Amino acid sequence: MFLRLPRPAPPAPETRALALADGGAVPVRWVRDRRARRLRLIVSDKGARLTLPMTASVRLAENFLLEHRDWLLAQLAKQAPADAPPFGRGQHEPLPLRGERVPLSWHEGRFARARLGEHGIELHLPERADDRRIRAALREFYLEQARADLGAWVPKYLPTLPRAPMAFRLRPLSSLWGSLSPSDALSLDLALVLGRPSAFEYVLVHELCHLIHANHSRRFWREVEARCPAWRDERDYLRGEGLALKGTLARLIR
């Protein structure tokens, strides 16, 4: 009888500095993951993170970071909206919704709420409503708008799927745009409703197709393409604009 020895635990995550041409450096968190099959670099509100397969060499990872250094700097620069002051009373900047900048107007009201009116987004507030209540009203507004989009899209895809998701969840996500849990609960980033609708719908299609194939095989991508032929364009849009969308949402509702 042979005993199976436990696999060694992955090394603890560590932070390494990526040198820049101007003499500066960018911290990158290195995380080894048994499930990883390739190197993956992401940027979220927590900074830059490099996920490595267990067998990937340090030299391979360093070369990968050097090749993607310009992309990393561009993504970090787009994170600037998250560093701006939180949204509050008296600000009149247009607000993002479905890829457009929508005019904002302020109104007195008994309850703090936001609605989409004939001339833009209307914020109705009691006189003593503080900025936290204002941001809570905006959060609920964006949730309502995102739910409306899902209500328009989901019914046309359900007949093509083996089963329906058990639940839909809309909330801010740090790096992902969506996920499907083992219990078939589908999560989507609320920031998607700020960007163009076609990108939001692509992420929905992507996650729905995981009900057919729980992987990213060629068969999975064929299912995605059958429902969203321009998925590559939408993926590129999110790669280019996604960090700014996430940062803007954080400033508006947190």
Image (cartoon, helix red, strand yellow):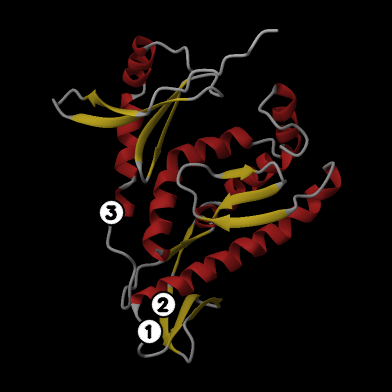
Q: Residues within 10 Å of mark 3 (few under 14, many from 20)?
A: few
- In percent of width and height, residue 120 lies at 49, 73
Q: Is residue 2 shown left or right of residue 193?
A: right
Depth check, front residue: 182 or 27: 182
**Secondary structure type for disc 3:** helix
Q: Is residue 103 shown left or right of residue 73?
A: right
Q: Label 3, label 1: how many angstroms apart (C-alpha)? A: 24 Å
Depth check, front residue: 204 or 180: 180
Q: Quadrant of residue 171?
A: bottom right
Q: Which residue is mark 1?
A: 129
Residue projecting furthest to the front? 1
In the rendered structure, are the residues bearing label 2 and label 1 in contact, judged by CB atoms less than 8 Å apart?
Answer: yes
Q: Which residue is mark 2?
A: 133
- In percent of width and height, residue 11 lies at 40, 22
Q: Amino acid at mark 3?
A: Asp
**Secondary structure type for disc 1:** loop
**Which mark sits nearer the N-terminus, 3 or 1?**
3
Depth check, front residue: 26 or 224: 26
The answer to whether 45 is drawn above or below residue 172 in the figure is above
The quadrant the N terminus occupies is top right
Q: Is residue 236 shown left or right of residue 155?
A: left
Q: Which residue is mark 3?
A: 83
At 69% from the left and 23% from the top, the residue drawn is 217
- In percent of width and height, residue 196 lies at 54, 51
Q: Residues within 10 Å of mark 2 (few under 14, many from 20)?
A: some
